[in-house]
Image: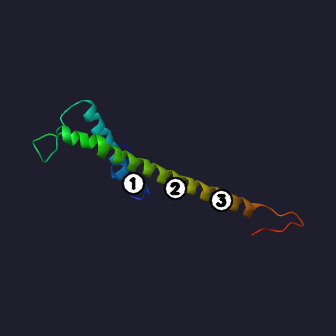
Amino acid sequence: MATYSAQSKFCRPEEDPFLLLDRASRSIEQLLRRDLPLRRTWSEQPYGEEEITLLEEEVLPAIAQCLARIDAIDSALSAAGEELYRQELLAAAQKRRVLLPGEVALI
């Protein structure tokens, strides 16, 4: 497992709530596909047909919708970051550009 410095601007994977949500969703789907009892730590009674139907029809689609929205938000943030970086590079290049005689700097 990779180690992360205390000064990293990124969180560790186990601290990312949406990564955890994605893993949880996949785990639930795997359990349902394998047709195993879905047990909880607080109850001896595993989920029955009604609870499993709610998971399949309501909970898992809601998680998928949440994760899709997070992907859209992340994509927008990434695009904005790339545009800012491009603008910074352009500004730095313009500052380094030597003006030829008769040219006026556009600031």
Question: Alpha carbon of mark 2 to alpha carbon of mark 3: how far?
Answer: 15 Å
| Image coords of residue 106 (percent x, y) | 78, 68
Question: Alpha carbon of mark 2 to alpha carbon of mark 1: how far?
Answer: 17 Å
Circle 2 residue: 77
Task: Tell me the tag on residue 11.
Answer: 1
- Label 2: element kind: helix
Tell me the amino acid under the disc marked 1: Cys
2 or 3: mark nearer the eye = 2
- Label 1: element kind: loop
Q: Does label 1 or label 3 sit earlier along the sequence?
A: 1
| Image coords of residue 60 (percent x, y) | 32, 43
Circle 3 residue: 87
In which image quadrant can residue 31 be found? top left
1 or 3: mark nearer the eye = 3
The residue carrying pointer 2 sits among few (fewer than 14), some (14 to 19) or many (20 or more) residues within 10 Å by Cα, namely: few
Vertical side of 46 occupied by 101: above or below: below
